[in-house]
Every structure is written in structure tokens, then in C-alpha cells.
Image (tube, coloured by chain):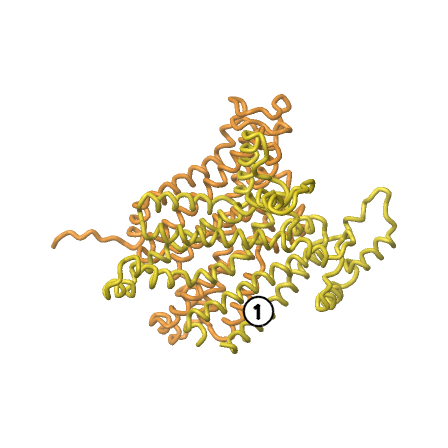
Chain colours: A orange, B yellow
Amino acid sequence: MTDVLRLTRGQLVRRRFMRNKLAVFGLCNLVFMFLLAFLGPYLSKHKWDELDFMYLLQPPSREHWFGTTQIGGDVFALTMRGLQKSLIIGLLVAIFSTGIAAIVGAFAGYLGGKIDKAMMWVVDLLLVLPAFLLIAVMSPLYRGKTWLVFVVLLAAFGWMITSRIVRGMAMSLRERDFIRAARYMGVPTRTIVFRHLIPNVASILIIAATLDVGGTILSETGLSYLGFGIQPPDVSLGSLIADGTNSALTYPWLFCFAGGALVLTVLSVSFIGDGLRDAFDPGASTGANS
Amino acid sequence: MLNYIYKRFLNFLLLVVLASTMGYFLAAIALNPRSNYEGRNPPIPASSIESKLTALNMNDKTPVVERYFTWVSGVVKGDLGTSLNEKSVNSEISRRIWVSLRLLLIGSILGSVIGVITGVVSAVRQYKPFDRYFSITSYIFLSAPVFLIALLLKFGAINLNNRLGYTLIYTVGEYSPEFQGAGLSSIVNRIQHLILPTLSIALGGIAFYSRYQRNAMLDVLSSDHLRTARAKGLTKRQALFKHGLRVAILPLTTFFAYSFGLLITGAAFTETIFGWNGMGQWFITAVQANDINSTAAVILFSSVLVLLSGFLADIVTAALDPRVRLR
């Protein structure tokens, strides 16, 4: 007997992922961003909501690493705070919206018929209007309330495309023997969907959720940039960029750290997402995903 | 084919009605025009606030459904109501619609054409320097939000103008109001204003389309029918353009149509940043001012635009691909 190296699917995927240089770079960078966002504030002696009236609009220095704002806020602490908010929102929304997408898509695809038609009609309707417009209109409803409402809205309008993909896969899984066997054994629909269908589309869900993190961070910062998202006094990368815009040419540090952190984060997430897709399914074409 | 078009059109009409209804209800429930009049100094008498809001069909004491039907009966007759500062929404739209459409059309056409070309070239030269360079660049552009790209372009142009000592590229407005010239020089003036907003819309598009087209093209390049085309004696180039590109480009018509939703979002940012008085910028100010009728009008506009382009894409796809019609 020769020794054959046996790999589980998980090991195989991990191996393929680790061979992808961009994906590994993205992963390292994202871990770094997380550490920076959540541990960074402890390294600096300035709090994000603290004002230092001795230093107004100072360029980066040993005292204030990223400089200070017009009213003496520490740009490093503010950027870390904004990065935290954007990362948490991105993660939460990605988890929620992928969850909704999985449930709606799996039920629609599995049940078929009228229920499927009705569900896909709702999906089409929600796809007509850009989520940005809808959330911006609803922004007065969560002004002054917790930012979690904002998260719920972002998730509520961000699940449609993934659910269509899941539906397509569920339709073909429905005809497979193991699902059919379960059905003939009298397993209830709910159990079939949650125990047999959804685990079988897990790889798609993981990829979609990862890419969603990037997409969500882009929408969140966009809405916050225009004042429809995270409300002051709290900050997000978007609102930081908006605050820095007017004086960005003379005082670039107000603007460039938040902008740089934003691009680097989203870039890493999309490297990871594409890497995951290649690792799960090396033969598949990697469709462009925004 | 006619039957198919008819069916698609009915579906399109229904979706427009539903989407604009949803938009109106959201705007009417979420926005509070009353707050604009309350807490003023000197205070406005309650009765005059009431009558003003009722006249605008924005009084929150009237049931939403009733206000909706008043709005719809106007819309059916082609009257979109009155904005909060008591201007006709119709005249506002006619002033703004071409500003936005010009930006969206030029931006999306530039974006898709350049994107498709770079995508095809990247696929043909996979892993060569051109491909690597464009892949990384498009990744970066896809990771940067529109407002960041627009802002950076603006700063870049201001720096350039400062260095040159005169204004080569304008960063505010769609034309210079004090500008008196006619003919060619006025066109040049408009183009100087057009460059940056169009570029900020197009750059994202180029990145997106080139990624998509590159992958679609790579799929086609390894497909059987392209190998057959080579086997029957076509050169690589002939096979590519005659049999490859056509298949790879078809799905893009749908993409192109449905990208208008995203483009409107992008236009809201670019118009605000570059001071264009278009539909997107109007939407932002209308929501901030609690102006229900104007907000509903922009939502109606965007749903018509998205669905109309989707409808056209369906027809084009059906015309090019007989398999679709038979469904």
C-alpha cells in the first residue's frame, strides 16, 4: 500500500485558497484592519470623542498620529472609530442579508409553483428601485435611534440577488435523489430546506456573504457621506470623509486616512471573496462581482 | 415576437406602478414636511400651516391612502404636483432631466465600450502585463465608492488648474453662467464641465465591465464551438471576433440595462459633488427638505428609467437570441 494523502474537502479548499496570493494578501490585510480598528484605540492616548484644544488642525505628529480636526479631534482615534463602525455594519448586514437570501431562495426554489412566482416577483420589485434611494428616503425614521435600524434596512434591501442564485441551485437540488428520498420518507418541508438544501449551497453562501461585506461597506459609507447613515456625534468612514472634504486640499490628513482605510478594507474583502470562489469551485468562471 | 413584447410591456407597466407606489408611500410616511414650518421664529400660525400642507397634498393629518390617490390622479394626467417651495414639479423635472440623462448616457456608454474592449484584450492576453495591470486597477476602482473617486478627481483637477494657472477643467456646475460665447466655444465650455462627472461615472463602469467581459471571454475561449471554428480553418482572430465575441457580449445587454439603477445612485453623488442641478442632486435635497412630491417624482423617474432600459434589453436579447422568445 502506498501512502495516499487524503484531504477532506475543507482541507482542499483551504489549500487552494492559500495558494492564491491576492486572497492571502486580502486576508492578512483584513485581519490587520480588524486588529487596528479594535486594538488601535488602546495604543493611542486620545479618545475619539475627546477634543484637544491645544492642537487645532495640526498635521500628523508624534502627539496626534494622523493629525487633528478643526475642533481638535484626534484623526487617528476618529478613523479607528469609523473603521470599527464600517466593519461591524458590513459584517452584520452580510450575515443578515445572506440569511434572508438563503431562506427565501431555498424555499422558493424547493416549493416552486405559485409560491416561487410570488417570491421572485417581490425580488424583481425590490430590484427595480435602487436600495440607496429607498434607504435614503427612510433615513428620517431612524434619525436619533440606534444605528441597528440602519443595519436592518441595509440587510432588508440587500438580499435579492443572492436569493436568486440560491433559488436556481435549490431548483436543481430538488430533483436530486437524496432530497427526493427525504421527501418520500415524510420529512417535513422545513426540515428538508434547513437540513438538506441550505447546507448544500453553503459554499455559495459563504462567497456571497464575503462579497456582501464589501458591498455593504460601500453603501454604508455612501449613505453616511450624504448624512443619511450613521448620525453625528457617532462617526463612520463615510461621514469622516464628508467632514474632511471641504478642506481636504489644504489639510489632506482630514481626508486621506479615512479614504485609504475604506479602499483597503473593501479591496481586501473582494480579494478574499474571489479567492474563496476559486477555492470552492476551481472550474467555475469568476463572474465580475461588484 | 409581438406577443412576447406585449407580455413584457405589461409586466413592465405593472412594475412601474408598484415601484412608484412603494416609493410614494415610503416618502409620505418617512418624510415630515410639517417640521419645516414648526419651531420657526416668529411662529407660523397653526391654521396657515395646515392650509399650506393641505394645498401641497402633504398634510400628515390626511390619511396616506387618500393623499396617494390625489397624487396618482394628478400623475395620470401628467401633473406631478407641487414641490415644497411651491414650484411645479413638472417644470423642475424638465429642467433637470436632461442634465442627468446626458451624464448617465455618456457615462454608461463610455464605461461599457471601454470596459468591454479592455476586458476582451485582457482575456486574450491572460496573465500578460496588460491583463495584470488592468485587473489590479479595476479591483481598486471597484473597491472605491463613487464619491471617493469623484472627490479625488475634483482635487486632482483643482491642483492641475492651479499648476497651469488657468482653468482647464471646471469642477463646479454644468456650464459657466457668466460665459457669453456662442457656438463652438460654448460647446468647449460644456465639455470642460462635463469631463469630471462623466469620468467618475465611467471609471466604475469600465472596471465592472472589463472584469465581467474578461471572465465571459475566458469562458468562451475555452469552449467547444470556438475550437470547432479553429478546426474548420479560421484563424484565431477570425474565430474570436466571429464566434467568440458575440456569445460573450450577449449577457451584457441585460447587465447594461439593469446597471441604470446603480448609475442613478452614482449620479446622486457626482451631481452633488460637482454641483450639477440634476435629478440625483434634486433627490438628495428633496429628502433633506422633507419634500414628498419631489422625492416621489425622482423615484418615479428612476423606476421608469430602470424598467424601460430593462424592457429594451429584453427585446434586444430576444431579437438576438431565439431561445429566449420560445420560453
Specify whether residue A47 is in view.
no
Who's the residue at 38% across and 69% down the image? A172
Specify whether residue B241 is in view.
yes
> Mark 1 — on which chain does it sit?
B
Between A186 and A83, which is closer to the camera in this rendering?
A83
The spot of residue B85 in percent (x, y) is 77, 51
The spot of residue A130 in percent (x, y) is 57, 56
> Label 1 sits on what residue type?
Phe
Please state if B47 lies on the left or on the right of A32 as rendered. Answer: right
Indicate the quadrant where residue A22 lies: top left
Indicate the quadrant where residue A31 lies: top left
**Residue, far bottom:** B3
Tag 1 secondary structure: helix
The spot of residue B33 in percent (x, y) is 75, 52
Between B263 and B61, which is closer to the camera in this rendering?
B263
Who's the residue at 60% across and 51% down the image? A149
Q: Is residue A11 above or below residue B311?
A: above
Question: For the N terminus of chain A, which image quadrant?
Answer: bottom left
Between B40 and B271, which is closer to the camera in this rendering?
B271
Q: Is residue B171 above or below residue B236?
A: above
Between B219 and B168, which is closer to the camera in this rendering?
B168
Q: Is residue B79 above or below residue A218?
A: below
Please state if B79 lies on the left or on the right of B258 as rendered. Answer: right
Q: How many marks?
A: 1
Q: Is residue A1 above or below residue B74?
A: above
Kindly identify which residue carries mark 1: B12
Classed neighbour count for the residue bearing mark 1: other residues with Cα under 10 Å, few (<14), some (14–19), many (≥20): some
The spot of residue B31 in percent (x, y) is 71, 54
**Residue, far front:** B183
